[in-house]
Amino acid sequence: MSNPFRWLVFTLVPVILFVGISVADDFTKVDLDRWQKEYMSVVKKGRDLWVSPRLGTNGVSCAQCHPNAANTHPETYPKFQQQLGRVIPLRDMINWCILNPLEGEELNPYDPRMVAIETYISHERKGVAMAPGKH
């Protein structure tokens, strides 16, 4: 083993591993409480959007077809979705519903409203086993 390579293996790699391991799990109750509060605030924003007709133009809300996100099954995505004719992530199905039944405009996948809706739907199914591709 050459000197530069030996230095890398025996000095730098252990330091990188130690720093990565020691930082990865260092969070406090204050951190956990803050993160939960942030998460629940996004769930609330998602629910507010879910029950409101403002995502569309025809007065229809998501909750009219899916009260409490019923029959959305986020745990099954990505999956083949007949309406779109391909395997899609949940956000594509949300956009399909916004465009079609709600007659609204598609949301960017990173739009905070999309994140809130996905978060709300997933929160409603919390504890259900992941089952990608299931119908």
Image: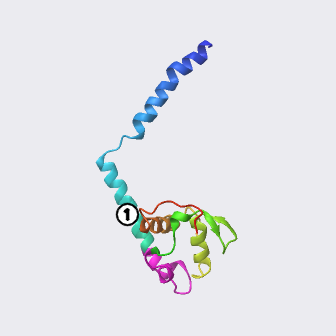
Q: Nearer the viewer, residue 131 or 118?
A: 131
Foreground of the two, 11 or 56: 11
| Residue 41 colored in magenta in the image | no
The magenta span reads 48-68
The residue that mark 1 highlights is: 40
- Residue 60 belongs to magenta span: yes
Which residue is rendered at x = 39% and y = 41% of the image?
25
> Is 70 displayed left or right of 84 in the figure?
left
Which residue shows up at 47% across the image and 69% down it?
Answer: 121
When asked about the image quadrant of residue 79, the answer is bottom right
Vertical arrangement, residue 52 with respect to residue 2, above or below: below
Q: Give the percent coordinates (x, y) of residue 67.
A: 45, 79
| Helix, strand or loop status at disc 1 | helix
* Left or right position of 59 against 79: left
Q: Main secondary structure of the magenta part?
A: helix
Kindly identify the residue that appears in the image at 42 percent across and 40 percent down.
24
48 lies left or right of 76: left
Q: Position of residue 81 (x, y in %)?
A: 64, 70
Could you say which is closer to the camera, residue 135 or residue 17?
135
Q: State which quarter of the image contains the N terminus.
A: top right
Q: Residue at x 39, y 69 (%)?
A: 44
The quadrant the C terminus occupies is bottom right
Residue 106 can be seen in this image: no
Q: Examine the image and state in which quarter residue 45 appears.
A: bottom left
| Residue 87 appears in the rendering | yes
